[in-house]
Image (tube, rainbow, N blue to C red):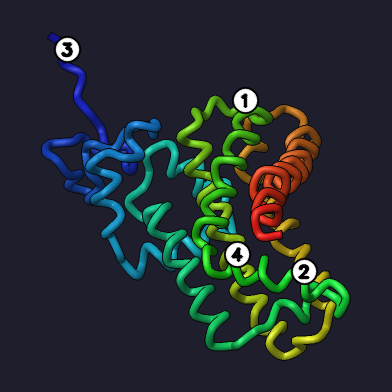
Amino acid sequence: MSNQKMKCKNCDTELKGQFCLECGQRASVKRFTLVDLFSTDFLLGLFSLERSKFLFTVKMLFSNPGKMVRDYIAGKRVRTFHFFTFLIIIITIYQILEYLLKIDFLNTVSTPETAAQLESFLAYTKQHLKIFTLAKIPIGAAITYFIFQKANFNFAEHLVLNTFLVSAEGIIRSLMLFPLALEPDNVTLSFILGWIPRIYTVIFFYSVFWVFFERKLHPFLFSIASLLLIMIFYVLLILYPAMLILS
C-alpha cells in the first residue's frame, strides 16, 4: 500500500480532510476533463460568488492573465472566480450597461445604405447574446488546442482558458460602451475601439503560452494566427449561417 500523502494543489500543504486547512481549497481539485466540466465540483463552483475572487480575477486578467490561467489549470483555484460563472456575470453586466446607455449599434457599424440589412441581424444577436458569446469558446478551444500543442493542455483546459479570454473581452466591450454612448454616430471611433479586444486576444494567448516555447517569436506569431483563425471560423460557422437564416 502506498504511503504517499496527498498535498493541496494550491499551496502544497498536506491534506487531512476534504478541504485544505491552510488555504481552504477543496481536496478533490483535479485536472479538467470534459467529464469534470459537468461534475458536482463544477456545479458547486457555479454558486461561489465571493467579491474578493471576482476582483482578483479581473485584476489578473489585465495584469498577468497567463500566470492566472496556467495556475488555474494546474489546480491553484482557491483565489480565482469560477471560470463559467465569471463569464455569465460579465455578459449580464454588459447587457445591463447596453440597456442603460441605450446604444444604437446601427449608427456605429453601418452606413444608411446597409443599416436596413443589419437591423434584424443586430436585433437577433442582441436577443441571443449569451448563445453567440458561448459559441466562440469551443471554436477558440479547437484552434488553440491545435496550434499550441506544446502546452500539453487537453481540450477541456482549452475550453477553460478560452472562457477566461471571452470574459476579458466582455469586460473590454463593456468599457467600450461608455465612449460609444458619448459619440453614438462616430463610425471611426467604433472601428478603433473594435481593435482593442483583438489586440488583447493576442496578448492573452502570448501571456498564457510563451513559457512553453524556447523562441519567444513563435508564440507571438501563433497568437496572431489563432486570433485570425478564430475570427474566420466564427464568421463562417456562426455569423454567416445566422445571417442566411434571417435573410
- Viewer-proximal residue, 216 or 193? 193
Q: Nearer the viewer, mark 3 or mark 2?
A: 2
Estimate the spatial distance between the alpha carbons at disc 2 and disc 1, rounded to whole Å. Answer: 41 Å
Number of residue marks:
4
Estimate the spatial distance between the alpha carbons at disc 1 and disc 3, rounded to whole Å. Answer: 33 Å
Query: Which label is found at residue 149?
Result: 1
| Secondary structure at numbered mark 4 | helix
Lower sequence index among marks 2 and 1: 2
Query: Which label is found at residue 2?
Result: 3
Lower sequence index among marks 3 and 2: 3
Residue drawn at 45 percent across, 42 percent down: 71
Mark 2: which amino acid?
Answer: Gln
Estimate the spatial distance between the alpha carbons at disc 3 and disc 4, rounded to whole Å. Answer: 55 Å
| Secondary structure at numbered mark 1 | helix
- Image quadrant in which the C terminus is located: bottom right
Q: Is residue 218 left or right of residue 154?
A: right
Horizontal and vertical percent for residue 199?
Answer: 75, 57
Residue beneath disc 2 = 117
- In this rendering, the answer to whether 185 lies above or below 114 is below
Q: Is residue 206 left or right of residue 166?
A: right
Query: Which label is found at residue 159?
Result: none
Lower sequence index among marks 3 and 4: 3
Estimate the spatial distance between the alpha carbons at disc 3 and disc 2, rounded to whole Å. Answer: 67 Å
